[in-house]
Amino acid sequence: MADMGTWRNLWVTRWQLWRQRFWGGQSSAVQGLMWAVASGLLLCMLNTVVRSITLNLNVYQSMFLRYLFGLLVMLPFMRGGWVELMPRNLRGQFWRGGVHSVGLMLWFTALPHIGLADMTALGFTGPIFIMLGAAWFLGERMRADRWVAALLGFAGVLIIVAPKLGGSDGTYALIMLLSSPMFAASFLITKALTQTETPKVIVLWQALMVSMFGLPLAIYFWQAPTLWQWAGFALAGVFGSLGHYCMTQAFKATDISATQSLRFLDLIWSALLGWMVFSDLPSVYTVLGACVIASSTLWIARRESRRNRQTISPP
């Protein structure tokens, strides 16, 4: 009977063959967009798990444990020792971890008070900051159609957000909005780090840095988690690590600006999960804004696909 090592090698071989067949005929731009879609779905599943936990557990403790379990999930895949674990740009990893931690503190503060669909819609302001930063700091070429798609998506977000700013949830909506430029800065640093670091190292050090920065607040607000909450953090670690790994692969494969239009698909995933898990029904404004967002997403996806075909066709 084959031992566990033999079975593992068999599955790894099958995975590599499938990946070669599936990805071999795809351009790097298409691969980047597919990684981005997978990342969005996984992170929406992560948000669902974490929101259910933060309804009954301190948000800063939840932030620490979510990334601590993400770190534990990554460690078994680092078989090369410290040579594989150590980044080439340690300073960049610290900067990214610090910026991302500030964004997470704002995000976790608002998380228990906002529905998943509305939370996702508020996060859609991030592409505007990312596209500005990518043009100013990374030197990426900003095509007019990407700007139009992002601005149309942002208009859809305004339709969703505007009615809430005057209500009791207005404060938490603004806190959630403040997290967007912080996450945008984190993603831009991630894009820069992909030039020298592997996706595994980037995801590992993000989990390590956020765990380190979040530890003091977690100790101060510590509550004893239940067995189900521990299980939820373990699941969140899996979803989070896989989601950020896919995101990093997307940033490595194509321009960061090109991936941002597909983030608007996250609204569909979050609305479905919010309805199934929390019985949250999107408002009329959320549905209307989602239609605007979906239209811009489909339009830019078609433009990117057409541009990609023209790039790979022979002269």
Image (cartoon, helix red, strand yellow):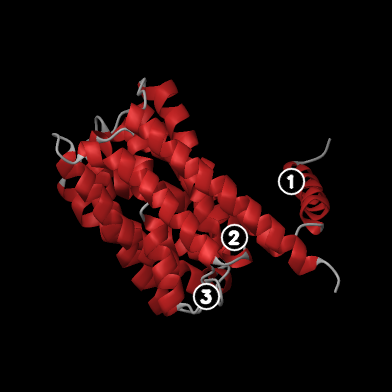
Residue 282 place in picture, x, y as percent: 36, 27
The residue type indicated by label 3 comes to Glu
- Which residue carries the number 1 mark? 8
Location of residue 303 (image quadrant): bottom right
Under mark 2, the amino acid is: Gln
Query: Badge 2 local density, few (<14 within 10 Å), some, or many (20+)?
Result: many
Q: How far is disc 1 from disc 2 in space, using C-alphas?
A: 23 Å
Q: Earlier in the sequence, mark 1 or mark 2?
A: 1
Residue at image point 26% right, 48% down = 176
Q: Position of residue 275 (x, y in %)?
A: 41, 23
Q: Name the quadrant of the N terminus.
A: top right
Q: Amino acid at mark 1?
A: Arg
First of labels 3, 2 by sequence position: 3
Q: Nearer the viewer, residue 115 or 314?
A: 314
In contact (CB < 8 Å): disc 1 and disc 3: no
Is residue 237 left or right of 16 when viewed as pictured? left
Give the Cα distance between marks 3 and 2. Answer: 17 Å
Residue under label 2, please give it: 249
Tell me what residue is drawn at x 41 percent, y 56 percent: 151
Q: Quadrant of the C terminus?
A: bottom right
Q: Position of residue 81 (x, y in %)?
A: 57, 67
